[in-house]
Amino acid sequence: MSGEIHEFESLRVKVDDVIYMPSLDAPPEKPHPFVYFISIHNDSPLPVTIRGRKWVVRESEGEIVVVEGDGVVGQTPTIQPGEHFSYNSYHVVASSAQATGAFFGQTATGDRIFARIPEFRLDVPDWV
């Protein structure tokens, strides 16, 4: 197993939905909560375990927030060939923003891989 990490195109990340949810708790300095729904699809012939993630959120007012951590929503799921892992989470922003990033994992053969999270928008509605 090498120490290199490479993009694994057989692992597809899909942003299934993004919903503005003003009923969720949010601090006064970041009053706009969004729930996002993500699915990670394994189109490879190998099981893949998700070990971590890195998100970059760029707000329209210029602030950039980087979120890194182990696993995804407190888990390190192993996704079998042809299967997918879906979850939802939420993020709070001060203004409209765009989010992107990557999931990091390992194949059953020990290769370290990553899959890009497609960029998506957190648009604060005009009525707010």
Image (cartoon, rainbow, N blue to C red):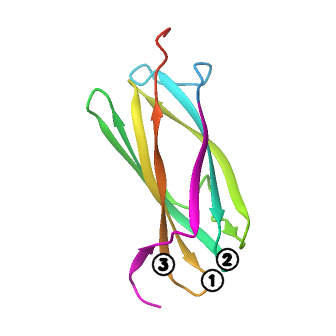
**Residue at horizontal 62 percent and vertical 71 percent from the top:** 49
Report how far apart the C-alphas of labels 2 and 3 lie in the structure.
12 Å
Q: What element carries label 3?
A: strand
Give the percent coordinates (x, y) of residue 100: 43, 47
Report how far apart the C-alphas of labels 1 and 3 lie in the structure.
10 Å
Of callouts 1 and 2, the N-terminal one: 2
**Residue at horizontal 40 percent and vertical 37 percent from the top:** 98
Q: Which amino acid does label 3 sit on?
A: Arg
Q: Main secondary structure of the magenta part?
A: strand
Q: Do the residues labelled 1 and 2 touch (CB within 8 Å)?
A: yes
> In the depicted view, which residue is nearer to us: 51 or 37?
37
Q: Which residue is disc 2 drawn over?
A: 47
Within-10-Å neighbours for mark 2: few <14, some 14–19, many 20+? some
Q: Which mark is residue 112?
A: 3
* Above/below status of 2 relative to 115: below
**Residue 14 forms part of the magenta stretch:** yes
Give the percent coordinates (x, y) of residue 44: 64, 75
Q: Is mark 1 on a helix, strand or loop?
A: loop
Q: What stretch is highlighted in magenta?
A: 1-18
Q: What residue type is labelled 1?
A: Ala
Q: Which residue is disc 1 drawn over?
A: 108
**Residue at horizontal 63 percent and vertical 65 percent from the top:** 76
In this view, which residue lies farthest toward the left?
Answer: 62
In the picture provided, is 6 more to the left or to the right than 17?
A: left
Of callouts 2 and 3, the N-terminal one: 2
Q: Do the residues labelled 2 and 3 touch (CB within 8 Å)?
A: no
